[in-house]
Image (tube, grey):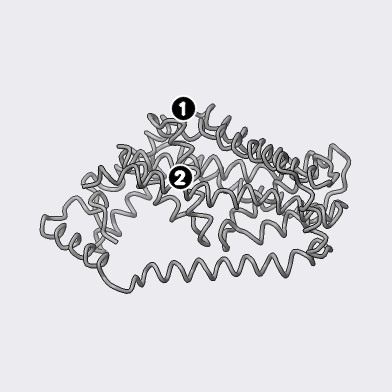
Amino acid sequence: MALHPDLLPPTAGTASLRSLTARGQVARRAPGGSRGGRRAAKLLVSGALATGILALALPKVAGAQWADIATALKGLSTGQLGALALLWMAGLWVHTPALTAAMPGLSHRRALLLNLTGSFVSNLLPLGGAAGTVANWRMARSWGFESPAFARWALLTNLFDSLLKLVLPGLALCWLGVAGVEVSGNVSTAAYVGLALLTGTLLAVWLVARDDCAVRWVGHLADVVVARVRFLPAADEGYAERAVSFRRESAGLVAAGWGRMIGGKLAYSALQAVLFWECLRVVGADVHPAVVAAAFAVERILSMVAITPGASGIVELGMTGVLVAFHGEPALAAAGVLLYRAFIFGMEIPVGGLSMLAWSLRRRPAAP
């Protein structure tokens, strides 16, 4: 894979650029496709792992046989599936203001495209978030956005998303208490884990937002490492000054668009929770809204542990375990969870893949 010129150190000469480009061209022409083969093998292994977890563990966690779960899913009509799909798409659309606020000049249509294609890539590989970010970066660059602008976008959107995920278990725990529902150990554990992670994240954000000291120290550390490790690219102005500039520009974006960032994230999560509740309802599961919120909060926390693609397998077990612990009917609870994940995780793969293909075909004639 050829290196992008913008990723080269500013001091790189013409000869170095030619050398690196030539190496990239040779790598692209090299027979065998070893890198593609490794990706395919990783995809197969991770997919088999997630499928195995679901196939073997879900019936035990739910206390229901696969035949009973399949029976609950067979009764769905085309109209019900269409309504659920519209609700899923509505959630993606209301999320776009949070994305456009973090990158001025980004349209809502392109924000939706970034969301879908990033999810498509990250849902295919374990710990695939980095690959999804690279795919989004390439798209943003093709639209004329500079790398620093994309970096701020990625940082802010992921930060707000993570903070909301960490807050949800505590909110669900409070709702359960107000509703008089006996709290299970899974929800309590998720709430405590979320609280601990939220405290650490807020402390880090406070240190960065307070002044330039924290980021300047980190940038200075990077400058020291770059000075000792010669092959690492150096920054013309130094990483300390670059980090300070990055922090100030990010703070300006938050000051101007924090309302849209928070509002978009909240609306997105709310519609996802409603989608989950509707998935349970259409399969016939009668679950208290506070319990739905608890299972949804557990799903948000577990989705951060992406040791399988999109944390598939792990998330379904956690959500089903919460519903069954709150006396949900086992087969219907598992069926509702699988239906919900079919939209939140499964649908993002073909829709995101087609979106990325359309983007690739549109930009190919303009490629040098």
Between 217 and 108, which is closer to the camera in this rendering?
A: 108
Give percent across and percent down for residue 61.
79, 63
Residue at disc 2, secondary structure: helix
Residue at x-position 80% and y-position 42%: 281
Residue density around tag 1, few if under 14, some if 14–19, many if 20 or more, within 10 Å: few
- Image position of 26 (left or right of 279): left
Type of amino acid at the residue the image marks with label 1 = Ala
Residue drawn at (16%, 57%) of the image: 17
To which residue does mark 2 refer?
355
Amino acid under disc 2: Ser
Residue 158 placed where, x, y %? 50, 44
> Which residue in the structure is indicated by mark 1?
255
Quadrant location, the N terminus: bottom left
N-terminal of the two: label 2 or label 1? 1
Which of the 4 quarters of the picture holds residue 264? top right
Label 2 to label 1, Cα distance in Å?
32 Å
**66 up-or-down from 81: above or below:** below
The answer to whether mark 2 and mark 1 are in CB contact below 8 A is: no
Q: 243 or 118, which is in the foreground?
A: 118
Marks 2 and 1: which is nearer the front? Answer: 2
At a point 28% along the width and 53% down the height, the residue shown is 223
